[in-house]
């Protein structure tokens, strides 16, 4: 039985084995020696050895008192530095005459989908069996009513956190500083000072896309106009410019005609320049 930190073995992994033996009412079949971190199955003399991998290199010399290690269990697999560290241990424990071994890896999936342990689960092997469980799969009397109440409370408050903490789901990258971020393009309209929060909240990408498209069309027309002007003879260009200036002048006259000498606009409203 391996755990990354030797300091956590005694009060966590070893205690869990004691709990399991008690639940099965099998205390008379086992001898528990906490000082040497061993549990012996009395009918056959088989042992469960508990070792930490603070210094993985020391495990290379591990040897069973008799027979060989048929079962190797890695607890909290995500705490190891990677698959290589586990592989180094198995190269020492998987030595036996009949070659029949069972290697268990148990862990609570990290929140990050890119964590090496989560990625390792996606590697398909014909001799691998994956099993998932959560608090909903165990007898309720193993936990408490308050435990279930806390789970339901978190589910209502933050479903994403609930799915990871209670259901063991890898729900994200694990590196997000802000969880409620909306991903969208920041356009020129939103850049600058004095943009209110109301403006940002009411921002409609569809409307913005329409305005951008209109500006693109106008720019294209202006570009085509410049090309046509470059092809004109000097006399034609002069006449074209005179026509443009005349149209702009008429637009200005129309605006002035819409106000009387007192600055009153149609409808009795007074405009102030």
Image (spheres, rainbow, N blue to C red):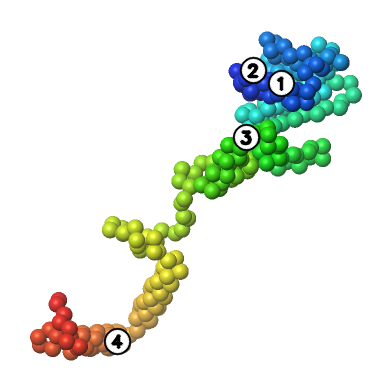
Q: Position of residue 86 (x, y in %)?
A: 70, 27
Q: Residues within 10 Å of mark 4 (few under 14, many from 20)?
A: some
Secondary structure beneath label 4: helix
* Residue 55 image-quadrant placement: top right
Give the residue at mark 2. Answer: 10
Give the residue at mark 3. Answer: 144
* Residues at circles 2 and 1 in contact by the CB criterion of under 8 Å: no
Q: In percent of the image, x 35 and y 62: which residue is there?
A: 199
Structural distance between the alpha carbons of marks 2 and 1: 11 Å
Structural distance between the alpha carbons of marks 2 and 3: 24 Å
Of callouts 1 and 4, which one flags the residue occurring earlier in the amino acid sequence?
1
Q: Position of residue 39 (x, y in %)?
A: 75, 16
Of callouts 3 and 4, which one flags the residue occurring earlier in the amino acid sequence?
3
Say whether residue 22 is left or right of residue 214: right
Looking at the rendered image, the disc whose residue lies closer to the viewer, 2 or 3, is: 3
Residue 132 seen in the figure = yes
Q: Position of residue 235 (x, y in %)?
A: 28, 87
Residue 38: mark:
none
Of callouts 2 and 3, which one flags the residue occurring earlier in the amino acid sequence?
2
Q: In percent of the image, x 42 and y 66: which residue is there?
A: 204
* Residue 251 image-quadrant placement: bottom left
Q: In percent of the image, x 80 and y 16: which residue is there?
A: 28
Looking at the rendered image, the disc whose residue lies closer to the viewer, 2 or 1, is: 1
On screen, 245 above or below 167?
below
Structural distance between the alpha carbons of marks 1 and 4: 97 Å
Q: Residues within 10 Å of mark 3 (few under 14, many from 20)?
A: few
Residue 240: mark:
4
Residue at the extreme left of the image, as rendered: 262
- Front-lying residue, 76 or 233: 76
Q: Position of residue 128 (x, y in %)?
A: 79, 37
């Amino acid at each position: 039985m391996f755990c990354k930190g030797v300091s956590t073995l005694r009060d966590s992994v070893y205690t869990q084995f004691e709990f399991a033996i008690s639940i099965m009412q099998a205390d008379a079949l086992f001898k528990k020696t906490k000082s040497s971190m061993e549990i012996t199955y009395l009918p056959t003399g088989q042992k469960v050895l508990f070792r930490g991998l603070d210094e993985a290199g020391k495990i290379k010399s591990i040897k069973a008192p008799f027979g060989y290690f048929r079962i190797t269990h890695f607890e909290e697999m995500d705490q190891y530095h990677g698959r290589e560290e586990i592989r180094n241990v198995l190269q020492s424990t998987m030595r036996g005459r009949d070659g029949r071994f069972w290697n268990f890896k148990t862990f609570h999936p990290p929140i990050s989908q890119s964590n090496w342990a989560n990625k390792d689960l996606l590697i398909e092997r014909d001799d691998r069996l994956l099993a998932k469980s959560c608090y909903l799969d165990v007898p309720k009397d193993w936990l408490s009513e308050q435990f279930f109440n806390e789970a339901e409370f978190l589910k209502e408050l933050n479903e994403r956190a609930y799915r990871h903490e209670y259901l063991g789901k890898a729900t994200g990258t694990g590196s997000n500083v802000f969880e409620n971020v909306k991903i969208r393009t920041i356009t020129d309209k939103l850049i600058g000072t004095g943009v209110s929060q109301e403006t940002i909240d009411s921002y409609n990408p569809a409307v913005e896309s329409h305005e951008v498209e209109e500006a693109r069309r106008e720019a294209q027309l202006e570009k085509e106009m410049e090309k046509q002007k470059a092809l004109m003879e000097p006399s034609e260009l002069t006449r074209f410019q005179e026509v443009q200036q005349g149209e702009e002048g008429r637009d200005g006259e129309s605006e002035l005609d819409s106000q009387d000498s007192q600055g009153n606009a149609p409808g009795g409203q007074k405009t102030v320049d």
